[in-house]
Image (cartoon, grey):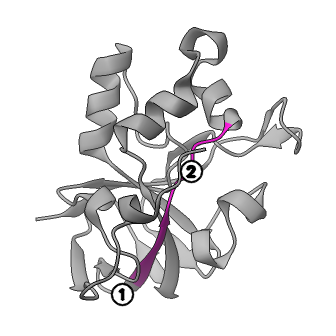
Amino acid sequence: MPRLLAVCAVRELRRDAGSMGVTAIDKTPQPGPVKIGSYGARGDVQVDRKHHGGLDKALYAYADEDAAYWADALGRDLPPGFFGENLRTEGIDVNASVVGERWRIGDRVEVEVTSPRTPCQTFARWVGGADERGWVRRFSDERRLGVYLLVRRTGSITAGDEIVVLDRPAGAPTVLDIYRAP
């Protein structure tokens, strides 16, 4: 049964060398039910809504199976929120989802898959800076990207909630089909 392992929101804004000057990539699991609105998880921040937010990218989902791959490859623990994700999932191959696929999370919240994550230099600096040279290319090449979600129905969700695929449009491209490496 696919389920939600964690709902994450920004822990704190951090200084960053990028054009925005700060980043909200530092996310941590939230206790109890978390309200999900049109722009994402309550308490979360999207510093750069052009690239990492707005309605079509209100939530970012990342699979625990992919996080385990990277934990092994990098030789360190990568807890929920490490990838800047709002939703850490288990038992659903988010990278095989198709554009327009709709999920119900818990009893009420409905989301729609809109696009894959495109890794950026802020993400590379967060992962390890000079210690992980070539991170953007490496992450891209593995195609373990995670997906952005549009919120179709608001409500509250919590860790442990079931994820149900409500609709998978026939003939729609997978998020990996439309991915363009940076």
Where does the magenta region start and end?
110-120
Q: CA distance from mark 1 to mark 2?
A: 29 Å
Q: Is residue 110 visible?
A: yes
- Residue 35 lies in the magenta stretch: no
User: Considering only vertical position in the picture, is 133 above or below 49?
Assistant: above
Which of disc 2 and disc 1 is earlier in sequence? Answer: 1
Residue 168 percent coordinates (x, y)? 25, 84
Label 1 or label 2, whichever lies nearer to me, is: 2
Relative to residue 86, is residue 1 drawn left or right?
left
Decide: few, some or many residues near mark 1? Use Cα within 10 Å; few <14, some 14-19, many ≥20: few
- Residue 113 lies in the magenta stretch: yes
Q: Is residue 76 visible?
A: no
Query: Residue at 54% across / 26% down in the picture?
Result: 135
Residue placed under numbered mark 1 in the picture: 108
Relative to residue 68, is residue 27 drawn left or right?
right
Residue 98 percent coordinates (x, y)? 33, 74
Q: Is most of the magenta stretch helix, strand or loop?
A: strand
Query: Residue at 64% across / 78% down in the picture?
Result: 55
User: Considering only vertical position in the picture, is 36 above or below 41?
Assistant: below
Residue 71 percent coordinates (x, y)? 33, 24
Q: Secondary structure at mark 2?
A: loop
Residue placed under numbered mark 2 in the picture: 118
Query: Residue at 59% across / 70% down in the picture?
Result: 58
Q: Secondary structure at mark 1?
A: loop
Quadrant that contains the C terminus: top right
Amino acid at the residue labelled 1: Arg
Question: Camera-side residue: 74 or 141?
Answer: 141
Residue 77 percent coordinates (x, y)? 37, 22
Decide: few, some or many residues near mark 2? Use Cα within 10 Å; few <14, some 14-19, many ≥20: some
